Image (tube, helix red, strand yellow):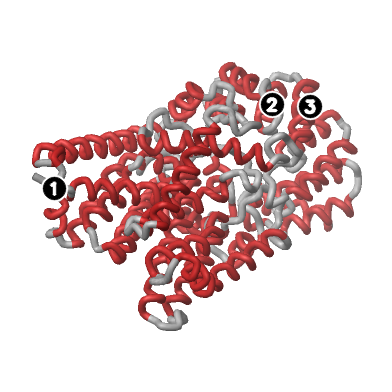
Amino acid sequence: MVSASLYAKKPIIFLITILIAIGFFVYFFNLNNPLFWDDDDWIIRNNFVHTISWDNIKFWLTHNTLAGVGMKSNYYRPFLFFTFALNYIISGIKPFSYHLFNNLIHIANGLLIFILVYKIFKKKLFVFLASLIFLIHPLQTEAITYVSGRGDALVTFFMLLALLFFYKAENDSLDGTSIKKIFSLIFLVLGLLSRETAIIFPFLALVFYISFISKERFLKSVKQGLIKTWPYFLAVLVYGLLRLTVLNFQNTLNFYATPNLYSENLHYRLFTFMHVLVDYFKLLFVPTGLHMERSMTVHTSLFQWPVWLGALIIFGILGMLYWLYKNRHPDFKIWLFGWGVFFIALGPVSGITPINALIYEHWLYLPMVGFWLIASFYVVKLLDCQSATFLKIQGRTLVIVALIAYFLFFAYQSIQRNILWGNQLDFYSDILKYEPNSVRINNNVGNIYYNKKDLENAEKYYRIAVSQDDIFAEPHFNLGTILQSRGDIYGAVKLYEKAIEINPNFYYPYQNLAVIYAQQGNLTKAVENIEKLKLLIPNNPRVYYNSALVYLALDNKTKALEDLRKGLEFANSDLETGRLMEELARELSK
């Protein structure tokens, strides 16, 4: 018979070893999965993560995540890109080191949860269960097996370290100004540079202080907690001001270029989040039908299904918290911290600030810590409840068997997801079973067939993508390249122009239009597109080389030399183009 008392006799290192072994086993199946999807733009085609140099570091610190491939985004994650650069130095675009790094961060996060919670509760089975579920839950695969999803694990790693050192500082120093507090602040800054969601940390630290450090009543604890956590709020405030000014690459507070029903109505966003919350709880308990790119209805009323159910869940949690607090119940602290972590971590994706998606599985990476802390707490209570009639030896054994089966189901689902991520076409096809009209997924499937030179199937999926809402420029451009290859120049130009209309900063159509107009002898239009490219990708030497060729055709030798000299400033990123520019510059200078 297994019980909590048996776990109490196990040394900490034994339980940690089990967690590490299970974590490695479950994620062993992703180690050779290829890089794909956003990995192309963030790693493979991004020359700024192919080396670690002072110029590249400055670039990461001053540009958005897509600047390395000449595009713009709302994301700013310089430390994340530093880790990608480390991987690239180690193994180029071979996937093993990337996946191993992700897996190690995930396992480290599981261990940090174990260490942090054990310091507070001293209950080995409780913290073991919470850490185990965090490690093996299949929802986590979207953040860990997807290399570009590393930001979720990385920011959680730094926030957990910051929280651990905050706890140590408050226990080891009367005034809280120890070196541990400084380390805590450093980890917060690294978290902010890894993913924007680290802005929640001051609130996590505050709820942690109220729950487990302060000995005062609630309101006094809040006041003391604000005093103890003000340096974190200050750091986040400075970060926020920078993101809204010098680091505001687009409208940072709104991912939507044009207003819409969702972005313009806060109450609609909150109603929609109530539905999302219901789906999240279903996925936490029964993680089946997992897939990326989930669609979600925008709700306009509290009384729509299942909006009202989500509202009832929230009010139920708040009511139970009030009851526990009013009756000074010892469970109040675990409820406050658990639900605090859950809802604080969901805050940035709740719709309070308009975001570019309504639901993602990886958004539960950190929130599930709070949820499963509470669940594990009561599971251990159940196992320790020896006096209850229904929990005699047979009953407890039944509960243990059910838990083992449940955890095996989690592990099996995670392994299956890790295997599925290893085949791009199978992965996308699986998503299309749930979201057949997804623009991005149909475009991605089209890309796979295009790379296989199966243009018939590529065109099929591109046409499905462009038949949906005009929100992505990519499928219009991709379909245009197929038409261009067939000689349908008119159709290709129309699609390229449509792509530019959707996203004027998407530079690929300008490249192809410049070539088309140059071939047609319309050098004026070719120059217009090349000049636009210089603005969008000013560090690309190939653009300046092509521009020089066009200006030579226009008999403008001065402008051609000017382009060559400018392009040579960036020749280190493309040595072959640099050589061509040097030869042409020498010839023109004679």
From this viewpoint, is residue 101 visible? no
Residue 470 is tagged as: none
Q: Residue at x 71, y 28 (%)?
A: 470
Q: Quadrant of residue 267?
A: top right
- According to the picture, the residue beneath numbered tag 1 turns out to be 386
**Badge 3 element:** helix
Query: Viewer-nearest of labels 1 and 2?
Result: 1
From this viewpoint, is residue 113 visible? yes
- Across and down, in percent, residue 217 comes to 43, 68
Residue 493 is tagged as: 3
Identify the mark nearer the N-term, 1 or 2. Answer: 1
Q: Quadrant of the C terminus?
A: bottom right
- Front residue of 224/22: it is 224
Work out whether 291 lies above or below 388. above
- Across and down, in percent, residue 94 comes to 43, 46
Q: Quadrant of the N terminus?
A: top left
Q: Quadrant of residue 390?
A: top left
Identify the mark nearer the N-term, 2 or 3. Answer: 2
- Across and down, in percent, residue 383 comes to 18, 47
- Across and down, in percent, residue 315 comes to 49, 43
- Front residue of 404/578: it is 404
Disc 3: CA contacts within 10 A as few (<14), some (14-19) or many (>=20): many
- Front residue of 287/585: it is 287
Identify the mark nearer the N-term, 3 or 1. Answer: 1
Work out whether 292 lies above or below 73. above
Query: Viewer-nearest of labels 2 and 3?
Result: 2
Disc 1: CA contacts within 10 A as few (<14), some (14-19) or many (>=20): some
Disc 1 residue type? Answer: Gln
Q: Residue at x 70, y 19 (%)?
A: 486
Disc 2 residue type? Answer: Asp
Q: CA distance from mark 2 to mark 3?
A: 20 Å
Work out whether 270 lies above or below 208. above
